[in-house]
Image: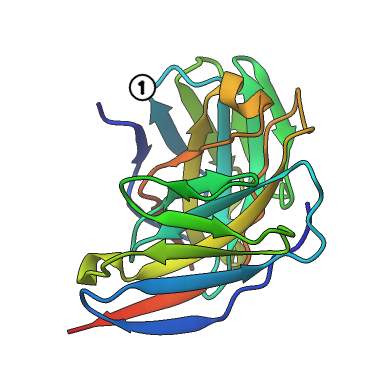
């Protein structure tokens, strides 16, 4: 049981380049999330999805796009990377039934460390 | 979500108990108390949660004050592998139909020494 898998683990981009971060979960979870974590700070929500084909903005969505074409995958795209997007990105997923009862347990991937030069 | 306050850092000796405090004086009656931890270079992982009663699981215990304005995460015997940042987070049980967006503060960095 792999849980939540993120690829790639590390990436270096030049300003203006684009890339896609992939998150895959094998727990049949409805909800998926993308967070970013900057040094010395807690995680901040970028975008999230409550089901296949649906996405919504989180706390810091600017400069990012997402897609949820399949239930198990949640993609985070950077169309034109900027140095301010240098961060560690975490994907998470959670079960909908537990969600509705607020017994929210989110399962996180190991993160993608992104540097934009 | 209501706000939580945690000490920035704590230290413990290995194999001794650790009590990590969290203050949440503005907690509402429908807020669950969740704890997550983040090991170095890892994503956060769920530790425990509770509403009113004390809770135990294989990782830790959660002691909740009678007035629910504070709680304590208890690691019964700290090991070097417990060195991590511990986050105390409140979640409103009435937020149905929407994704629960966890709000992470800066947490408590626990150092465990031999």
The x, y position of residue B4, in whole percent, is: 69, 65
> What residue appears at the point 35 percent right and 40 percent down from the top-left corner?
A7
- The residue most toward the front is B66
Q: Residue at x 45, y 76 (%)?
A: B109
B64 relative position to A111: left or right: right
> Residue B101 appears at what percent x and percent y?
67, 42
Q: Chain of mark 1?
A: A
Taking depth in this image into account, of B42 and B4 the one nearest to the observer is B4
**Would you say residue B106 is visible in this rendering?**
no
What residue is pinned by disc 1? A26
Q: Is B86 located above or below residue A33 in the figure?
A: below
Of residue B69 and residue A47, the one placed in the foreground of this image is B69
| Neighbourhood count class around disc 1 (C-alpha, 10 Å): few under 14, some 14–19, many 20 upward | some
A64 relative position to B11: left or right: right
Q: How is the image coloured?
A: rainbow
Residue A116 position in % (x across, y down) = 49, 63
Residue drawn at 43 percent across, 58 percent down: B37
Q: Is residue B20 visible?
A: yes
Q: Nearer the viewer, residue B19 or B67?
A: B67
Q: What secondary structure is marked by label 1?
A: loop
Instruction: Count every numbered label the image shows and give the total.
Output: 1
Coordinates of residue A67 in the picture (x, y in percent): 59, 26
Residue located 39% across and 76% down the image: B110
- In the rendered structure, the answer to whether residue A75 lies left or right of residue A64 reads left
Q: Quadrant of the C terminus of chain B?
A: bottom left
């Amino acid at each position: 049981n792999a849980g939540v898998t993120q690829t790639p683990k590390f990436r270096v981009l030049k300003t203006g380049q684009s890339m896609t971060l992939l998150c895959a979960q094998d727990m049949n979870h409805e909800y998926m999330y993308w967070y970013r974590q900057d040094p010395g700070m807690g995680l901040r929500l970028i975008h999230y999805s409550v089901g296949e084909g649906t996405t919504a903005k989180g706390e810091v969505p600017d400069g990012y796009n997402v897609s949820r074409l399949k239930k198990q995958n949640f993609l985070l795209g950077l169309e034109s990377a900027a140095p301010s997007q240098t961060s560690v990105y975490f994907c998470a997923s959670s079960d909908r039934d537990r969600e509705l009862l607020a017994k929210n347990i989110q399962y996180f991937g190991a993160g993608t460390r992104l540097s934009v030069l | 979500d209501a706000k939580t306050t945690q000490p920035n850092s704590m230290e413990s000796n290995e194999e001794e108990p650790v009590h990590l405090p969290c203050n949440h004086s503005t907690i509402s009656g429908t807020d669950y108390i969740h704890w997550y931890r983040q090991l170095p270079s890892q994503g956060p992982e769920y530790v425990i949660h509770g509403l009113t009663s004390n809770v135990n699981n294989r990782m830790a215990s959660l002691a909740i004050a009678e007035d629910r304005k504070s709680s304590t995460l208890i690691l019964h015997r700290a090991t070097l592998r417990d060195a991590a940042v511990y986050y105390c987070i409140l979640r409103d049980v009435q937020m149905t139909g929407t994704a629960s967006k966890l709000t992470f503060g800066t947490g408590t960095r626990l150092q465990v020494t031999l």
